[in-house]
Image: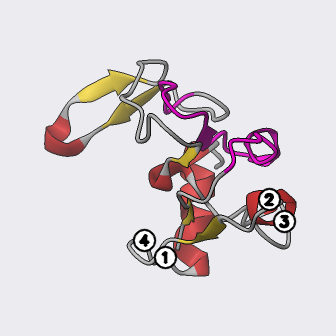
Amino acid sequence: MAIMITDECINCGACEPECPNTAIYEGGADWTWGGGTALKEVEIDGGEVIPGDAAQTPISDEFYYIVSDKCTECMGFHEEPQCAAVCPVDCCVDDPDYRETEEELLAKKSWLHQEA
């Protein structure tokens, strides 16, 4: 599963630099597939191919947020999700809407970083 940031977030920013996939963004900030990954382009729903550096709409305007499709729970990098480990208010929690197996998370990591 991916990690999500709840509305209890105090916007301290401690989580953002800890993410090895750059899946965490400040509220209101555009995000990109390529940021923190090796993706140069991405095929999105409907078969459209977009550049990896194309700005995507923020998921939250108010709080830091995690792009679920970029979150690997730090699998392959760390023993535990680093955002949750450093969060002073414990608002980085499992996202019940995104359940993934360890194999799926590792495959996502390989895709994001274009590992052979």
**The residue tagged with tag 1: helix, strand or loop?**
loop
Of residues 50 and 19, the one nearer the viewer is 19
Q: Which residue is drawn at 84% across and 65% down?
A: 85
Q: Residue 100 carries which label?
A: 1
Q: Badge 4 is on which residue?
A: 98
What's under tag 4, amino acid-wise?
A: Tyr
Q: Earlier in the sequence, mark 1 or mark 2?
A: 2
Q: Disc 4 or 3, which lies upstream in sequence?
A: 3
Q: Tell me: 41 left or right of 23.
A: left
Q: Mark 2 points at which residue?
A: 87
**Residue found 72% across the figure and 66% down from its top:** 75
Q: Where is residue 84 in the image (x, y as percent from the top left)?
A: 76, 65
Q: Are marks 3 and 2 in contact (CB under 8 Å)?
A: yes
Three-letter residue code for mark 1:
Glu
Which residue in the structure is indicated by mark 3? Answer: 85
Q: Where is residue 45 in the image (x, y as percent from the top left)?
A: 20, 44
Distance from Cα at disc 1 to Cα at disc 4: 6 Å
Q: Separation of disc 1 and disc 2 at Cα?
A: 22 Å
Mark 1 vs mark 4, foreground winner is 4
In magenta stretch: residue 26: yes
